Amino acid sequence: MNRKLVFLDIDGTLTVPGTNVPPESAVQAVRQAQANGHKVYLCSGRNWNMLSPLLVYGFDGVVASSGGYVVVGDEVIYDDPMSDEQRDAALAVLHKNGVFCTIEASTGAWGDSNLEEFLKGQPEGNSEIERWRKALAGSLGIRPMEEYDGSPVHKIVIMCPKAEQLDEARELLEKDFSFAIQDIPEHGCVNGEIISRSFDKGKGVLAICEKEGIPVEDTIGFGDSMNDLEMIRTVGIGVCMANGSETLKGYSDRICPAVEEDGLWQGFKDLGLI
């Protein structure tokens, strides 16, 4: 089998959303695949600071911040934050329309102080909502917006009760930024990410392929939510978790069991990685 590059989303794919400890079967799958000559990368919406606890498991690099910050080994090969002017304009129009925001830099994340209260009323089942619930509980180190230190921001996470609250922001920002919106469950909130059109998870995959000298046909990506769409579209084989977005499943080549059901182990086995 040709050497493969494998890309793993974190929340809802490698781990239960919002946690930093993968199932032991997933850890063993990653290590065995590496022993078989393959390389395994994290490919996450999380910033570097939020995903760093998972680096103890020996990944070969990361696509962080939805593609805005890419690392191979110890080398940063891509880093493209938004300008201060873009950040300030986005936050102004979003806050004007009552949208809850979290800004993410490689060094940390800062969220609106009233976001925690808003999330308490949201239904379960969305991996990104669960990630932020646990982040605000302290497990992922999110800090209040008032403590923001001016670090360069790669993306803005957004949440609001109604889609029309984003209309003015879209009109102002969509030329330069894409709005990656998750599937909206019945009676659930609108949530997603505002990401520069200069990058996405798929472009992060391509940057690593070029660095590693591996054709994109020899890549495999595992994800669960709509912020994995560009990765799934780009890789040679796209795999969605059974617990994932029904929309994303429609773009994927395969479905593997849920994260809590040893899904990555089974997926790696079925694809001949282990």
Image (tube, rainbow, N blue to C red):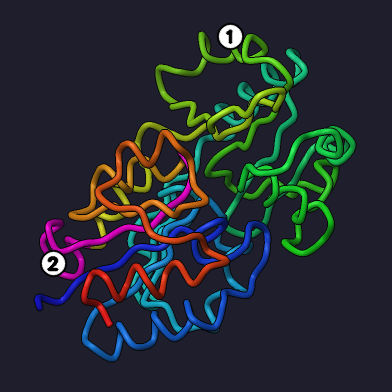
Please tell me whether mark 1 sits on a helix, a strand or a loop: helix
Amino acid at pointer 2:
Ile
Closer to the camera in the image, 34 or 175: 34
Estimate the spatial distance between the alpha carbons at disc 2 and disc 1, rounded to whole Å: 41 Å
Give above or below for 176 relative to 129.
above
Q: Position of residue 137 (x, y in %)?
A: 84, 56
Q: Is residue 211 magenta?
A: yes
- 143 left or right of 23 in image: right
Q: Position of residue 212 (x, y in %)?
A: 19, 70
Which residue sits at x=72%, y=23%?
Answer: 187
Say which mark, if any, is on residue 167: 1
Which residue sits at x=37%, y=48%?
Answer: 201
Which residue sits at x=82%, y=61%?
Answer: 138
Q: Which residues are magenta?
A: 209-226
Q: Position of residue 22 (x, y in %)?
A: 57, 74
Amino acid at pointer 1:
Asp
Give above or below for 105 relative to 7.
above
The quadrant of the rendering that contains the N terminus is bottom left
Say which mark, if any, is on residue 67: none
Query: Which of marks 1 and 2 precedes in the sequence?
Result: 1
Residue linked to disc 2: 214
Please tell me whether mark 2 sits on a helix, a strand or a loop: loop
Closer to the camera in the image, 271 or 45: 271
Q: Residues within 10 Å of mark 1 (few under 14, many from 20)?
A: few
Which residue sits at x=30%, y=45%?
Answer: 252
- In the orientation shown, which residue stands out farthest toward the bottom? 35
The number of callouts visible is: 2
Q: Position of residue 225 (x, y in %)?
A: 48, 43
